[in-house]
Image: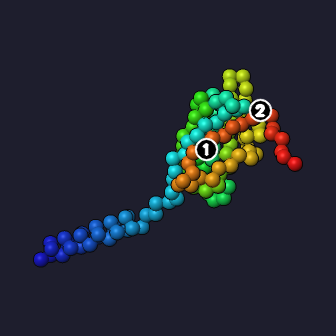
Amino acid sequence: MKSYRIFQFVVACCVCWATIVVGGCSRGPEVFDVSGMVTLDGKPVQRADITFVPVEGSMKETANAMVANGVYSLQCTGGEKMIIVAGMATEKKLIPERYMMKSELTANVAADRVEFDFDLTEKPRRRAR
């Protein structure tokens, strides 16, 4: 009879532990497969880093990937992101500084919006008046 009570105690502990582990763990924010092209004046960027930084929320949700021959692919949480691109556009040209730390590039990542192409320009574009 004593061994049966020990068995019941062990089973009860296992059920409690399983309930806590399975039911108590949050999955966190939804993550999306994001991809696209990065070009400079219409030509694919050879080697660069692209970073998706949350405009609001945790910096832990920042996502980074390598751009190779104009193509990138990364996993990123949803929401509005500031896009930073840094590296070599060609063997002799760096990505212009305005696309780095104070970049005005943005992307709003969502389930129905996961492909983003960025056409960078050597010279700033003129704003319409």
Count the marks: 2
Rendered view: 119 above or below 9: above
Q: Report the amino acid beneath label 2.
A: Glu
Q: Is residue 123 above or below residue 112?
A: above
The figure's colour scheme reads rainbow
The disc placed on residue 116 is 1
Q: Residues within 10 Å of mark 1 (few under 14, many from 20)?
A: some
SS of the residue under disc 2: loop
Disc nearer the start of the sequence (1/2):
1
Q: Are marks 1 and 2 in contact (CB under 8 Å)?
A: no
Q: Is residue 15 left or right of residue 53?
A: left
| Disc on res. 122 | 2
For residue 14, what is the image quadrant? bottom left
Residue 49 seen in the figure? no
Q: Position of residue 55 (x, y in %)?
A: 68, 55
Residue drawn where x is 61% and y is 32% of the image: 70
Whole-percent x, y for residue 10 in the image:
24, 69
The kind of residue on which mark 1 rests is: Phe
Residue occupying the point 58% across, 34% down: 71
Q: Is residue 69 visible?
A: yes
Residue found at the far left of this picture: 1
Q: Residue 36: horizontal and vertical position, in percent?
A: 58, 40
Identify the disc placed on residue 7: none
The residue shown at (38%, 64%) is 21
Residue located farthest toward the front when viewing the structure as drawn: 129
In this orientation, which residue lies closer to the viewer: 104 or 56? 104
